[in-house]
Amino acid sequence: MARSVTTQRKIINTAAAWTVGMLIFFPILWTVLTSFKTEATAIADPPVFLAFDWTLENYSTVMERSDYMRFLWNSVIIAGGSTLLGIIIAVPAAWSMAFVPSKRTKDILLWMLSTKMLPAVGVLYPIYLIFIKMGLLDTRTGLVIVLMLMNLPIIVWMLYTYFKEIPGEILEAARMDGASLKEEILYVLTPMAIPGIASTLLLNFILAWNEAFWTLNLTAAKAAPLTAFIASYSSPEGLFYAKLSAASTMAIAPILILGWFSQKQLVSGLTFGAVK
Amino acid sequence: MSPIRSLCAASVLAMVTAGGAFAETTVTIATVNNGDMIRMQGLADEFTAQNPDVTLEWVTLEENVLRQRVTQDIAAKGGSFDVMTIGTYEVPIWGNQGWLVSLNDMPAEWDADDLLPAIRDGLTVDGELYAAPFYGESSMVMYRTDLMEKAGLEMPEAPTWDFIKEAAAGMTDKENEIYGICLRGKAGWGENMAFLTAMSNSFGARWFDENWQPELNGEEWTTAVNFYMDLMNNYGPPGASTNGFNENLSLFQQGKCGMWIDATVAASFVTNPNDSTVADKVGFALAPDNGLGRRGNWLWAWSLAIPAGSDATDAAKKFIQWATSKEYTALVASKEGWANVPPGTRTSLYENAEYKAAAPFAEMTLGSINAADPTNPSIKPVPYTGVQFVAIPEFAGIATQVGQEISAALAGQQSVEEALEKAQALTADEMEAAGY
């Protein structure tokens, strides 16, 4: 029998959810507010919340100084390319582990995850040298490959978890109806796992979009994405918080908009299989 | 030769020549985000108009990221950059390792003899100039004239550390959140250790003796660091162990510091009425001394250098020549006024009456730069070059750890003596491991 929820409890739960939500969202809100302040107001003590002279000066300075569209385009290509390539490789891998597991499947999954346990800086120099040899330094292709490899274990794990929730009997039935392996994956498994694949796509797109270690270390002028755009506004000598906030807001805006419109898929994907 | 064959030959020659003339060379420039560099980027169209065969590409990075990126690229011969913005710390080390292209063959009209001797010396290794200074800086005392007057004191042009302490005591009004002195406390070789190394020089301290033995637990260092702690604990702002350049700049601009000893470049920020609430109440003085013959000021020059692996050396040299020339200074002056020209690199700038009229801190900057001697920074002889650093590759790592110990002492987690003993031990270990 479903438990009845009292109004008081509802209010408490809602208030708690809003408090936690605001706590998480506050740094982003503060960044956006700071981007509309002058440099002097940005460092004012005590800090000014809303009662300041709003200005768009920081945005016009940033637009004038940097080629925002070039950085944005690089981010789109790198994040999109690495995510798509990752999915293409991970779907068959996750299918085989979920539906035709061997006795080593668990070990393989753990081994894949273990590659995430090494700090990225530990392999920076070898990868840098390989990139020089292969002419991949400061290219979008190079970053697509590296970010795909970095995120591949997470993609495989996520897809494996979703695929495990799909009854094997359905695939078996398709096979008995004469479906080939390709048809089984493309026309039976994939449509059933759409929420899971969509949330995996989105999450990995966000991870690749925000990735700052490899994108800063393996790029120079040509392939630099929005993370490099933000980094260029930090200054050792002089005030920069307002302009840095404007650059950050411009860098996170596309991904925030994407997240806002796809939040339904993201939530349904992340909670997929949570309730049986 | 028949007329037709002559025509063909001429056409081929014309095509080849035209191809050569329009063959584009791309120069990738790695730089930091500060006012003078951004201004250079904005004016770079003037260079490309004069050199249509050269395309400039800019990579602007945060100082520490830039240092790591260019070190990595130059060591691995990645060839990502053709011009790099580096400081006086890197130039002697990288020059010694053969990582930089010599600039001794710059054309006569560039006038290398016009460079300020202290700055030029800091960028020269065994007679080879490895970088061209874009702007130079030292450190000096910036103080609030109104608070000084209220305290009944008058700042001498060349104060002593004892006077600084007396003035800090007189200006401190903690109830009204006014602190007599603001100094760097944030750990880092370019943060608190830059200040403390320069300050300790004036107390007779040195990092190493002539045999590369560290002297951090010696009497001079102990006296200097105790003096610093005394100033900071009694007259400094709360939480000073996390304050670097920008934090102190912000405190000073909000009227919370009586004095601030830091980079000369800060003068233009604290006197800018758009950002500073005390713009019209700021005075300047030379960095303090202890009567021992050395002042506690440093020397730094952001400079442009060419990595040895660059495949656009000629175009890169052309660019460096343009960006560090007297003509560039005149260009900035014509577009944005004399107060905005990059300071601290050329003698001719300080002989220019228009510049001196527009920049009231010009004489003090020149005096501070001339007072620094990178080859002879302290009172006793040293085996290294560098005023606020030791120009060896190991220094950045060692000084950052030492800076953490001193920052911990400032935060009250240990005594000065404990911090310096630990600093001595870790420095001795690192130097031994490095083969000194």
Image: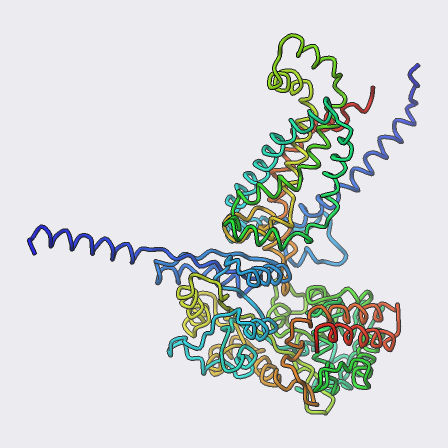
Which of B143/B248 is in front?
B248
User: What scheme was used to colour the molecule?
Assistant: rainbow
Q: Choose top left, top right, bottom left or bottom right for residue A116.
A: top right
Give the residue drawn at x 65%, y 29%: A261
Task: Residue A136 in the image: state x and y as whole percent.
Answer: 52, 48
Task: Please indicate whether residue B58 sits to the left or right of residue B196 in the image.
Answer: left
Q: Residue furthest top?
A: A177
Picture layout, residue A152 above or below residue B289: above
Which quadrant of the rendered structure holds the C terminus of chain B? bottom right
Task: Residue B300 in the image: state x and y as whole percent.
Answer: 60, 75
Q: Is residue B332 visible?
A: yes
Q: Is residue B352 visible?
A: no
Q: Residue furthest left?
A: B2
Which of B153/A192 is in front?
A192
Which quadrant of the rendered structure holds the N terminus of chain B? bottom left
Q: Choose top left, top right, bottom left or bottom right for residue B145.
A: bottom right
Task: Please indicate whether residue B154 sits to the left or right of residue A248 in the image.
Answer: right
Task: Residue B328 in the image: state x and y as whole percent.
Answer: 43, 70
Which of A229/A48 is in front?
A229
Task: Residue B289 in the image: state x and y as whole percent.
Answer: 71, 87
Count of numbered tags: 0
Q: Choose top left, top right, bottom left or bottom right for residue B330.
A: bottom left
Give the residue drawn at x 69%, y 74%: B194
Picture layout, residue B50 above or below residue B138: above
